[in-house]
Structures are given as structure tokens and as C-alpha cells.
Image (tube, rainbow, N blue to C red):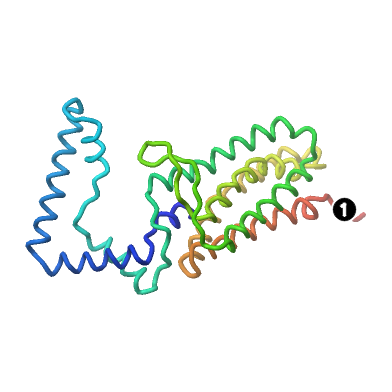
Amino acid sequence: MANLYMTTQTKEEAQATVDEYNKQQSDAAYLATLQAQDQANAEALAAYQLDKTKYTEEEANALIQYENQVIGEKQYAASNAIVQGDKEPGKGMNPSAAGSLVGMYWLLMLVGRLVGGSLGSKFSSRGQLTTVATIAILFLLCAMFMPDKQILIPGFENMSFTMIEAPVCVLFFILCGLCTSVMWGGIFNLAVEGLGKYTAVASGFFMVMVCGGGILPLIQGAVADVAGYLSSYWVLAAAVGYLLFYAQIGSRAKKAKA
């Protein structure tokens, strides 16, 4: 969802796309010129794929990074939906830059698991899950309510390492990777605690519950369609809030009544 939010056009970009589409449709000669440019680049790119030795690095980058000038009906429809207010605008970021930032989330998950693996024996599963769930909720709330400011975040754009200008909310979404990295182990340990001979059976049921990783994004996507990208993160805040409840209350085994 964060990637979609970052790469969706801003309202200004959407308006420019709609205006350009209308211009192309009203001027046949102009449209024909753009179609010729797109066709020429497509042919040159095909030739480059056959023999890359004939092209300099600058020429190759120009071919690869070329964006088609002719605006199709689907692109126009998506932009027009933003202009008309039927769809929430995004940040209009370069897709490669946005993908790099999403990759940093997974990198922080790796870092978190390495740190959790080395320090996990010193803290209880309940304490770990409580801590990371609390921090994750704070990160999500900061992301949803922080002012709409841009900051520089290190990342890759068009295969080059650089500082990427991104919304400050994205930084907090990325930092959530540190929190989610150690949740799985803590949840599992608490789920099978005190089950004795039923641990194996409970583990099987627990593994089935990973389907939540496919269901929650669907729910978040449905909420995003109605309430907007940032508002959809209330779904994740509620999910992490439940994990906090589970760590403190829900996971405590109750004695069966005689």
C-alpha cells in the first residue's frame, strides 16, 4: 500500500496528464508526431537488446528510461479519477525510488531479526512483543498524522545510490520493519506456552493462521478505496493493537474450571 501511495500521481500531475491527453486527442498531427517518437524508441530499444555493444551507457540509459509520450485511455482514466476527486492522489514518486524505499523496510526486518536473535534470550517473549507492538503503533500514528513534509532518505533511483526525497510518513512506515521483524517468534512462543502434549497440534493451527498475511492487505485495500491511502493504515494499527492486547492479556493461559 505504501508503494502505491508513493507512486500514484499528485493532483497537479494528474491534471497535467488530463490536459495533455485532451491536447493529443484534439490535434491529430501532434499525436502522430508523438506516436512516431514512441515507435522509434521502441525499435531502438529492441535493437539495443540484440546488441548492447553498439550503445554508450548514456544512450542505453536514455532508451531504458524513456517514457512513452502518447497517453492511453487507461492512464487518462486513472488521472481523471484523481482530478474529479474519485481517487485519492499520491506523491508521484519515481517507481524505482519508491521500490527502493519499500526494500529498506525488508532490510530493517533483516536487521531486526539479527538483533532479536542475538538478544532474544535476555528478554521474555511477552516483553518483546509488548515493546515492538507499542513502538509499531506509535510509528503508524506518526505516519498518519505527521505534517505533509518531504525529507531525504538514502536509497536507489534508476540503479544509482542517492538521496531520495520522500514524504516523512514513509520513514515511519519503513521503521515499522524493525518492529515486525521479531513479532513472529514472540507470538508463536506465547501461543504454545503451557500446552504440553497439545503443542504439536496447536503449532499446526498456528501455521494455518499465516493466511492473515493475505487477508489483511485485502481489507486494507478495500478501506483505501473508500477512505484513502493513509486512512487505510488504521487497519494495521488495529491489528498491531490486538497483538499488544494479546501480549499482555490474550496469551495468558486460564485454568480450566473443575
Q: Quadrant of the C terminus?
A: bottom right
Identify the residue shown where x is 24% and y is 49%: 67
In the displayed structure image, the side of residue 165 where residue 124 appears, left or right: right
Q: Amino acid at mark 1?
A: Ala
Q: What residue did someone put label 1 on?
A: 256
Label 1 element class = loop
Q: Residues within 10 Å of mark 1 (few under 14, many from 20)?
A: few
Specify the quadrant of the image occupied by residue 88: bottom left
**Residue 232: x and y, percent?**
54, 63
Specify the quadrant of the image occupied by residue 108: top right
Identify the residue shown where x is 31% and y is 69%: 80
Q: Where is 80 relative to 164, above or below?
A: below
**Residue 118: x and y, percent?**
71, 30
**Residue 197: x and y, percent?**
79, 37
Q: Where is 54 relative to 257, above or below?
A: above
**Residue 110: x and y, percent?**
59, 35
Identify the residue shown where x is 55% and y is 50%: 171
In the displayed structure image, the side of residue 61 where residue 23 appears, left or right: left
